[in-house]
Image (cartoon, helix red, strand yellow):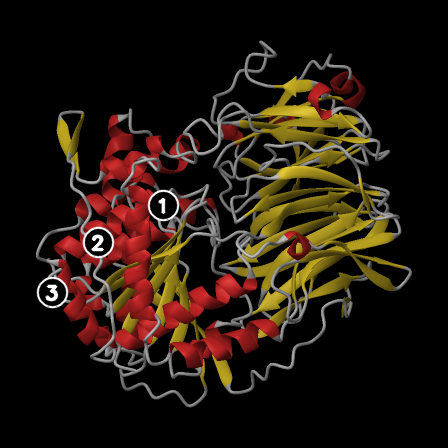
């Protein structure tokens, strides 16, 4: 489609003023490259976009964004939506993580009105800010706190900072009492995951060794140990590939050493994109001396997803032959799964994690996406801890020397707050997070089930204003993910989305297969050769909503982020007639080319390897860029990207935008929104999130005639 025609159609589609000056979307340069896999030839028109040094790349992104901005900025509802979104996000404090260490309580929270998260410490009933990344911002750049961990005695803090959403963390250390930042700096710690010694004298950490923005970035990382006050350049390497002939593993697997305040045994953990881990144990002192003789406790095939240490007791949460999980106990010094004792059997609940307090093991569980909390006591009995509403445990923290727990808990219409759990199972709001003034009495939620093509019941949740008419004329925005066995869309305060609901929209989330809402089997049912179930489950949910009168194709929008881009791309290609608009945020659209991005090879366990015939077949089936068909009447599409994205390379949404813009015959807009000061969304400021939400909701409403 010629740029002038495309621009004219966009003017009509968005109902912009006739005099609006909308630059056309740039026509991407076509330089076809062909690859042959197992006798099949694949043509890639826009391979050049994988090279961010190509002279046409940055101008292409800038022109695409200029086109998108010209369209989005004149949408009739955008300013009204942005004002309401800013009020909703600004009037609420948002807690993200919590940790009790010694006599101090640390918590990460975005305060009311703040543009980013800050780390606080509460001591003696008084709160103070420890890390405020907004003080490091400039007019053109922002800094985010990527991760943090207090030492067991609460005297020190280790944390990672990065710029512009890049997640390229630099490790810092702080003396908590004085607030002094120590001189040590350790780069390449995006996956640092520090683990302190019990005496708070130092910590193990993971360090990346690959060059930024290359396919080798996340390969062959290593474990090092830092003693406080030491020179980081001299930190000993305790595990890397080839260091120990007895420990063989693949380049995509990252090693971590984890110490415990409750045991003299350390754990070597090997991890990749899978939830399952490979575990070894060794005496901690041997590890520190570089003399560890590691003993294997679990392999990937044992499907262990979490563990806990107490003296010589090693607790392992395993899904092998028990897809919803069970808890086993073996010896930490001489581990043996074959003779391990089952201490918590499999049930209808999906077991997600375990952590120890003085009064027992706290177990985080889930029932179809709804969080549950249990405690395994010293008597060997499991007790259910009643939660105040159906919601999500965003965080669970315990101290092995103190009874009880701290949790962050939220629901669709219940803002997140930090709660304490007492030894007798009673919950109390700590009051750390102030209650917002947002009135939610006008809204309601509903949990429904759609029937998939194979008869499987697919849960989905809806949020809308009370008194909704089921006449098929309500705008609807349904999000879905369905990858990695992650329960991505569980109850969390609707916040910004209420601005869209205020416009008469129905907002919802589909718990499609490929996620983990019902355990490992739910994941496998939407993985590899079963991946089509993921987008077809979303289609089934939308069809069910339409059949019940919540909406209809002319009012239906869908959205997804990251790997949810697979779900969006393939759903719009299989059923372009079912949707009025599709939103793909930082979406993965060209999986066949994962070899060209820094977060590529490590993804093979989830998606398949292109060097394998079955892997190629699976990757081709989810590659929405390669399955765009010329002359199809596609719905309106909004794609977004951030130029510093370390997880999904910007070429994915860029290629998809270029391909759809030339292929669509509907006359509906295809926009590529580019944030030049953001990455995958982690670390984005409140203002950035507000602006993206306003663009998204205004775009949807413009396509459904509202």
Q: Earlier in the sequence, mark 1 or mark 2?
A: 2
User: Where residue 112 appears, x then y in whole percent?
Assistant: 66, 71
User: Where residue 29 appears, x then y in whole percent?
Assistant: 18, 43
CA distance separating discs 2 and 3: 12 Å
Q: Give the answer, above or below, for where 129 lies relative to 340.
A: below
Q: Which residue is mark 2?
A: 26
Q: Dot 2 lies on which element?
A: loop
Q: Give the answer, above or below, for where 266 lies relative to 621.
A: above
Q: Dot 3 lies on which element?
A: helix
Q: Which residue is mark 3?
A: 5
**Residues at marks 2 and 3 touching, judged by CB atoms closer than 8 Å:** no
User: Where residue 510 appears, x then y in whole percent?
Assistant: 39, 63
**Residues at marks 3 and 1 touching, judged by CB atoms closer than 8 Å:** no
Q: Which residue is mark 1?
A: 650
**Residues at marks 1 and 2 touching, judged by CB atoms closer than 8 Å:** no
CA distance separating discs 1 and 2: 16 Å
Q: Is residue 490 left or right of residue 658?
A: right
Residue placed most toward the observer, 670 or 359: 670
Q: Write the residue at 35% across / 71% down.
A: 73
Q: Nearer the viewer, mark 3 or mark 1?
A: 3
Residue placed most toward the observer, 176 or 575: 176
Q: Write the residue at 51% across / 59% down.
A: 369
Residue 332 visible (yes or no): no
Residue placed most toward the observer, 470 or 273: 273
């Amino acid at each position: 489609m010629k740029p002038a025609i495309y621009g004219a159609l966009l003017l009509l589609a968005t109902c912009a003023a006739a005099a609006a000056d909308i630059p056309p979307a740039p026509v991407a340069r076509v330089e076809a490259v062909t690859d042959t896999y197992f006798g099949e030839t694949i043509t890639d028109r826009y391979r050049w976009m994988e090279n961010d040094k190509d002279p046409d790349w940055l101008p292409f992104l800038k022109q695409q964004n200029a086109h998108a901005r010209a369209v989005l900025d004149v949408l009739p509802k955008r300013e009204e939506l942005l004002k309401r979104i800013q009020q909703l996000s600004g009037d609420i404090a948002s807690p993200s993580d919590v940790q009790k260490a010694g006599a101090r309580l640390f918590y990460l929270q975005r305060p009311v009105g703040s543009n980013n998260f800050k780390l606080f410490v509460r001591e003696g009933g008084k709160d103070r800010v420890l890390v405020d990344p907004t003080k490091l911002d400039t007019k053109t750049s922002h800094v985010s706190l990527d991760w943090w961990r207090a030492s067991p005695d609460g005297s020190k803090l280790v944390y990672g900072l990065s710029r512009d959403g890049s997640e390229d963390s630099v490790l810092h250390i702080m003396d908590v009492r004085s607030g002094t930042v120590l001189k040590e700096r350790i780069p390449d710690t995006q996956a640092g995951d520090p683990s302190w010694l019990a005496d708070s004298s130092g910590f193990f950490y993971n360090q990346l060794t690959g060059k930024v923005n290359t396919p080798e970035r996340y390969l062959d990382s290593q474990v090092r140990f830092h003693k406080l006050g030491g020179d980081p350049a001299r930190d000993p390497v305790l595990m890397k590939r080839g260091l120990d002939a007895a420990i063989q593993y693949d380049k995509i697997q990252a090693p971590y050493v984890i110490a415990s305040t409750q045991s003299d045994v350390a754990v070597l953990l090997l991890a990749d994109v899978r939830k399952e881990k490979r575990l070894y144990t060794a005496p901690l002192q041997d590890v520190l001396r570089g003399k560890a003789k590691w003993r294997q406790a679990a392999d990937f095939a044992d499907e262990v997803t979490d563990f806990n240490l107490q003296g010589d007791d090693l607790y392992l949460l395993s899904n092998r032959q028990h897809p919803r999980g069970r808890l086993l106990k073996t010896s930490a010094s001489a581990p043996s799964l074959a003779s391990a004792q089952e201490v918590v059997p499999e049930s209808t609940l999906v077991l997600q994690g375990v952590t120890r307090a003085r009064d027992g093991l706290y177990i985080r569980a889930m029932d179809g996406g709804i969080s549950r909390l249990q405690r395994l006591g010293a008597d060997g009995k499991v007790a259910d801890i009643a939660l105040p509403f159906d919601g999500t445990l965003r965080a669970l923290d315990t101290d092995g020397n103190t009874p009880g727990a701290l949790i962050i808990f939220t629901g669709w219409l219940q803002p997140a707050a930090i709660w304490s759990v007492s030894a007798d199972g009673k919950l109390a709001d700590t009051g750390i997070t102030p209650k917002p003034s947002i009135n939610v009495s006008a809204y309601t939620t509903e949990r429904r089930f759609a029937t998939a093509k194979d008869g499987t019941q697919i849960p989905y949740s809806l949020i809308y204003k009370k008194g909704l008419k089921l006449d098929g004329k309500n705008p609807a925005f349904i999000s879905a993910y369905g990858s990695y066995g992650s329960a991505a869309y569980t109850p969390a305060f609707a916040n910004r989305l209420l601005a869209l609901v205020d416009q008469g929209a129905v907002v919802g989330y589909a718990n499609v297969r490929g996620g983990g809402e019902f355990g490992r089997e739910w994941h496998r049912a939407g993985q590899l050769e079963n991946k089509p179930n993921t987008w077809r489950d979303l289609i089934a949910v939308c069809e069910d909503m339409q059949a019940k009168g919540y909406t209809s194709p002319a009012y239906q929008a869908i959205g997804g982020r990251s790997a949810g881009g697979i779900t969006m791309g393939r759903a719009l290609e299989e059923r372009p007639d079912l949707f009025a608009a599709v939103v793909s945020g930082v979406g993965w659209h060209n999986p066949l080319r994962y070899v060209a991005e820094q977060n590529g090879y490590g993804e093979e366990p989830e998606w398949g390897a292109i060097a394998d015939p079955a892997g190629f077949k699976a990757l081709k089936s989810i590659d929405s860029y390669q399955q765009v068909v010329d002359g199809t009447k596609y719905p309106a599409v909004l794609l977004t990207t951030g130029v510093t994205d370390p997880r999904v390379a910007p070429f994915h949404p860029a290629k998809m935008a270029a391909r759809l813009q030339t292929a669509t015959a509907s006359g509906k807009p295809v926009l590529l929104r580019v944030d030049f000061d953001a990455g995958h969304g982690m670390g984005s400021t409140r203002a950035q999130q507000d602006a993206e939400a306003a663009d998204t909701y205004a775009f949807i409403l413009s396509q459904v005639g509202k």
